[in-house]
Image: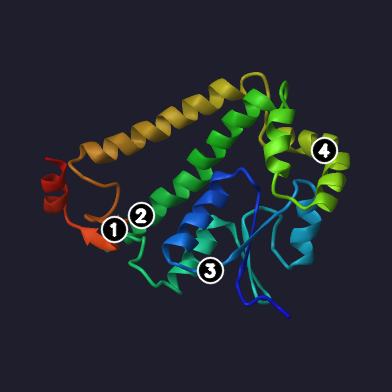
């Protein structure tokens, strides 16, 4: 008997995977989470028809929805609760989200890997393998030396990687602060979703509640 729930494929530690979980949970979409081991995930992703090997991947029947942005868009089409997207500034919001994914998210991960993969690889390996089934952990353990080298190459881990990523992140945070300094309350739009009551809260309500 097949499971009708979509399957969310994740690494145990990943801010991109966590964002996909948040979106599915927010829209009350039932799903089954499955952990894959790094290294083994490359073969599994291709086997399931994904266009690349990055996680998260949402498997919905025969369709493979890849990366957190794609999964958020998929969840919005099945929304049972208020949209997470702003009512206005749609293009600007998309541009901010893209920079957050491709620059901030990447360099936060690079910063972590630069501090751990060269000298403390076990601190990365153990959490990454935590949710993977036993057979994947066995194969992943055998592949780990090659996987570690691949991760170091992909994220360009070199002696000055930490300082380089810190500089890039500081510039991105300054960019966001400058946007707020224009008099905006939010980076995009003029409302925020109330996660506890499923209602949008206007500016005046937020100021009142903050008193």
Residue 23 percent coordinates (x, y): 46, 59
Tell me, yes or no, whether the two marked residues, 1 and 2, touch with CB atoms within 8 Å. Answer: yes
Q: Quadrant of the C terminus?
A: top left
> What color scheme is it?
rainbow
Q: Nearer the viewer, mark 2 or mark 3?
A: 3
The residue depicted at 56 percent of the width and 40 percent of the height is 106
Q: Nearer the viewer, mark 3 or mark 1?
A: 3
Q: Is residue 62 left or right of residue 136?
A: left
Residue situated in front as seen by the camera: 188 or 8: 8
Q: Earlier in the sequence, mark 3 or mark 4?
A: 3
Q: Earlier in the sequence, mark 4 or mark 2?
A: 2
- Mark 2 lies on residue: 93
The kind of secondary structure element at disc 3 is loop
- Mark 4 lies on residue: 144
Rendered image: mark on residue 30: 3
Q: Earlier in the sequence, mark 3 or mark 1?
A: 3
Q: Earlier in the sequence, mark 1 or mark 4?
A: 1
Rendered image: mark on residue 116: none
The quadrant holding residue 79 is: bottom left
Residue 165 percent coordinates (x, y): 54, 28
Residue situated in front as seen by the camera: 9 or 5: 5
Q: Residues within 10 Å of mark 2 (few under 14, many from 20)?
A: some
The kind of secondary structure element at disc 4 is helix
The residue depicted at 81 percent of the width and 46 percent of the height is 137
Give the Cα separation between the discs numbered 1 and 2: 6 Å
The kind of secondary structure element at disc 1 is loop
Q: Is residue 168 left or right of residue 32?
A: left
- Mark 1 lies on residue: 89
């Amino acid at each position: 008997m097949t499971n009708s729930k979509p399957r969310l494929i994740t690494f145990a530690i990943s801010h991109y995977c966590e964002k996909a979980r948040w979106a599915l949970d927010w829209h009350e979409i039932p799903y089954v989470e499955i952990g894959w081991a790094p290294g083994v995930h490359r073969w599994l992703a291709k086997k399931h028809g994904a266009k690349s090997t990055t996680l998260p991947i949402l498997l919905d029947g025969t369709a493979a929805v890849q990366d957190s942005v794609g999964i958020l868009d998929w969840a919005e089409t099945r929304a049972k609760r208020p949209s997470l997207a702003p009512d206005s500034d749609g293009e600007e919001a998309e541009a901010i989200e893209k920079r957050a994914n491709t620059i901030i998210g990447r360099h936060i991960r690079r910063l972590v890997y630069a501090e751990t993969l060269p000298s403390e690889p076990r601190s990365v390996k153990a959490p990454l393998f935590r949710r993977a089934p036993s057979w994947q952990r066995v194969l992943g353990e055998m592949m780990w030396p090659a996987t570690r080298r691949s991760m170091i190459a992909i994220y360009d881990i070199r002696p000055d990687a930490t300082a380089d990523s810190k500089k890039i992140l500081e510039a991105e945070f300054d960019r966001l602060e400058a946007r707020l300094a224009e008099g905006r309350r939010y980076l995009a739009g003029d409302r925020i979703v109330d996660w506890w009551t499923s209602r949008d809260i206007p500016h005046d309500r937020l100021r009142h509640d903050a008193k």
